[in-house]
Image (cartoon, rainbow, N blue to C red):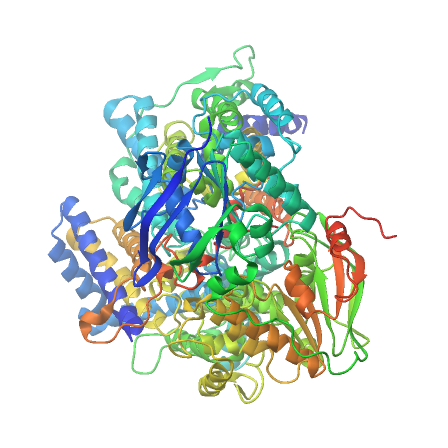
Amino acid sequence: MGRSLEKAIIPVAALAVSLVLFGAFVAAAGANPLDVYYDMYRGGFGTWFSFQNTLQRAAPLMLTALCALIPAHLGLIVIGGEGALLLGALGAVLAGRALGSAPPILAATFMMVAGAAVGGVWVALSGAMRTLRGVNETISSLLLNYIAIALFNHLVEGPLRDPVSLNKPSTFPIADAATIGNIPGMDVHWGLVFGLLACGLSYFLVMHSVHGFAARMIGGNVRAAALSGIDVARLTIVLCFVAGASAGIAGAVEVGAVQHTANATLIAGYGYTGVLVAFLARQHPLAAIPVSLLLGGINASGGLLQRTEHLPDATVKVLQGILFVVILASETLYGRYDWKILGRAAERKSAAVVPHAEPLAPAAGAEPTQVKGVA
Amino acid sequence: MSPELLRVDRLQKRFGSFTALDDVSLEVLPGTVHALLGENGAGKSTLVKCIMGYHRPDHGQVWLGDREIAPRSPRDAQKLGIGMVYQHFTLVPNMTVAENLVLSRARLPFFLDWAKEHRHLEEFLATMPFQVDLRSPVRSLAAGEKQKVEILKQLYLKSRIVILDEPTSVLTPAEADEILGLLHQMARANEVSLIIITHKFREVTQFADEVTVLRRGKRVGGGSVKDLTPAAMAEMMIGAAPRSESGPPRASTAGDVRLRASLLSADDDLGLPSLNDVTFEVRSGEIVGIAAVAGNGQEELVEVLAGQRQSRAGRVVVRDVEYRGTRAALRRYKVRCLPEEPLRNACVPTMSVADNMAFRSFDEKPFAVARLGLSRRAIVRRAERLIGEYRVSTPSPDARIGQLSGGNVQRAVLARELEGDVEVLVAANPCMGLDFAAVAEIHARLRRARDVGTAVLLVSADLDEIFALADRVLVMSEGRIVHETTPATADMRTVGQFMAGHAIEA
Amino acid sequence: MSAALVTVPLAIVGGALRVSAPFLFVSLGECVTEKSGRVNLGLEGTLVMGAMAGFGVAHATGSPWLGVLVAGGVGAVFGLLHAWLCSLPRVNDIAVGIALMVLGTGLAFFLGKPLIKPTAPQLPALELGGWSDVQAVRAALRINLLLLAGVALAFALRILFDRTKVGLIVRTVGESADAARALGYNVTRVRTLATAAGGFLAGVGGSFLSLYYPGSWNEGLSSGQGLMGVALVIFSRWDPVRCLYASLLFGGAGALGPALQAVGITTGYYLFGAAPYVLTLAIMLGTSSARRTLAGMPAELGTAR
């Protein structure tokens, strides 16, 4: 019981600590922290208008978070959501133009599928390189991001460019039939629903499906997974494809619902913010939903902060950085403390979490295990 | 300078609620060999680590000569002239022997003149009874040579009191005799005092002058070795007269060939050949033991059979069909594996006991629903049954398996692997680090598997275990099978020579 | 056409000499850190912070070298932060790197807002091309003093690792933490110092960007040099002098795009800009292998990968 309690308390505490540190930071920059907090609340959640703005910003974050979250259960740290989103957007534009005369649902679906396919392949590359050649997936996915940005810029300003768009180079717009509209009764596009669905499906996939179990075996101890006959390479590549597809759909949604075309506005860091969401949510697909809302709200309030507190737009990025660091540092608190004070009998806490301590008896006699080739 | 008297006075050490050492005293007279005898978990390692400065005892003192000492780190102990040769080497694998020796010195100059250091080392080596190549990287040395380097390191540092932790666990019988004999001679010449941690009576009776027996953290006996019989020592060690290991004789003769390796070759992690054309077969209803010194390819052999390492050439055949360790093949041909160090190789430490027990079957009915969903309840229910049957001591099926003791982890893995029909079982060092009771239990289960017709391949570095269990014994050296014999007809010296790679098949 | 045959290679050489300094310092810094057994992926953030801090200090004090020093100091602080976070149990090294990348860039952009318009004194350079009348040659052979310092540092680091007690200890910690502990060395302290040193060098590398080339501060200053430094170290098999050669190579590759643009080849500009990233990826593919551990890799890094 202590373990589930700490899963709720520690993230909330980390959030609080981050806000305090951020408050100190803005105070040093000359603003009143309480005003800043209030503006952030107002800009993100205070009115129905601002809340819808938050929802709209949260939608792509849910999808790009999954791009980092799903491979995390395999033990991989993938940060290629940015590249997958951009290339997925391009794929969606091509599909959206091609299907000008199709019924809207079909056209929109095809756009999503195209975005998912391209994004999926892009991240699957990182997965394949890792599992087949041992290339570190964090570095390869980051490099692929830069390559994707270069490809994107090249295609947007070159072969796919719409000659009409002089000031801001953009691709040809998608057909009207392919656009994605708003959820009835709201000013938020259907992308929000896609995000929610994706998180729900991922939850089932990771926590309650056979494939998720196998993935967690790989992430927990790849040797044990190999021993049990799991095809590590195949599952890794497939799940990386799924992760990339999710980010690709985010790109398709941005094209289909917001921009109706692909241009440099899409290079907005959704991919990296998605990584942050994944870590804040401790890689849990359902937790990614409220965390996306939180970060969407913070982003939404950026404009208000600029106008009323005269803080530069990088302020939001600083808060994100603080959040990221504090959440990571808080990982060390899990399993350390006895939550007996809350009236529950503590589990048998092993010494395993205390560094360099002797393991519990009777294994105390055995020496720590060593590397290969040694008795 | 000759060694001084080392005295340990009423040492006590606790880790949380667990008492590792309880009021232990002993004396090591100068120039003697003192054996520390005890089961795994008796406290021998902890005692020695207190002497070496790894741990601070909660109560009690350590005396060297007439001064009380309280080393706060192994480096402090080294400065006092006390050194230790560890069971799992503390050499840096990617560095050369020379670098490792120089590294161990307490005082180093800022700029290292390697030419000069090499010269000094060669002069030093010339006075030593055994030689090693200074320029070879430690990772390319065999286990016996690594052991020699560790011992040389202590002599290089001029340690007067040398502690050896299970020194012969990685050596062939001949190497063990050579090294222990040499050290005994040095003790006789009053150049060193030795403390040897061991659980082998033969070593105690052959090389030690005095012995201290520990059980569950307490000193339960000891004295001069010539006054004690092995039976008496064993009784002190386990608290009762030892039962004989041999089980009932095999019920029937072996059946058809279940597992065959043909010209199997594989490389190790560095890309160097580790298995070279290994060929053998295991029949149903027999236990084939592979005896080998660590580092001769048997770890890689088990990994290939377990599907954790790809082979370079050759085939593994199960029931006349080529076997590649896929999940479908594992299921169809009922191949199971008990790798060594189960927590590292066969379990996910952060997953629960129940989940770990489900590794073989989570994608089958009734644990999988519609081939996609998982039934948590079915998994936990099955785990509860296995936990009872195999007496796995765990707070609950949902406890993390990493929290369990070594013996219980192994029991959990056994429960998983021996479930249902097993046609081929590959076991590697299944009893390493376990207490006698667990060892007897596991041996009994292996025998029972054999008796119902499983083909069992047992890879072990413990010759006693191999000869107690196996029906046929293969010796592996340098990645090849070099000798075959049976327990009844084996000549131990020949076996030892083959293990060391020395003998030629007559 | 013949002009292009001369201009482009010349520009590549010039690029190599001009642009390689940040690569060099970052890779040398990461080399030191990785030799101690730790990976620091946050160097991108450190680089950007160093660039901003160096620029700011140079602008305020009028001394570019003071700017370099402060940039290094700021980098060292980030290195210490990385080391402290990684020393906490259960904290993932790679995630910490990413987090510091975000924090570093965010802080740098925030604090650097007032620095976008102003100028700051630049670092001096040696005019090795003074003998020529051709402007392009002069430009290509203008070597920055910081680059020369970096070259000397590369060789000095190799000597440090091969022939000194400090280098031996760092290598031991990076190859086997267990052995190091058994010998009484404080593994955490060694890694902290190594990471701080790595951060210092990355900060210095960043100051090169803002104080020499391109020579000003803006938010698009770095384009992944911090991260490519990590790949460079792998490519160089953790040898400082090979880091030098690799940095020159990458500097040259990075100059390909602008060089071609200068001779009028504008198509594919972005694609040429991607050349360093593609090159890095190709190198990693070529040198990594699923089955074998990389020769020369400090063994303790295996746990981080």
Residue B278 in view in this figure: no
C75 shown above or below B36: above
C199 shown above or below A259: above
Rendering coords of residue A1 (x, y %): 29, 76
B241 shown above or below B10: below
The one nearer the camera, A324 or B83, is B83
Q: Quadrant of the N terminus of chain C?
A: top right
Q: Quarter-wise, where is residue A110 in the image?
A: bottom right
Residue extending furthest top? C131
**Residue visible at 55% across and 52% down?**
A151
Rendering coords of residue C161 (x, y %): 51, 29
**Residue visible at 28% across and 39% down?**
C112
Q: Left or right: A17 with respect to C235?
A: left
Q: Left or right: B150 with respect to A18?
A: right
Rendering coords of residue C266 (x, y %): 57, 41
Residue extending furthest front? B227
The one nearer the camera, B223 or B173, is B223
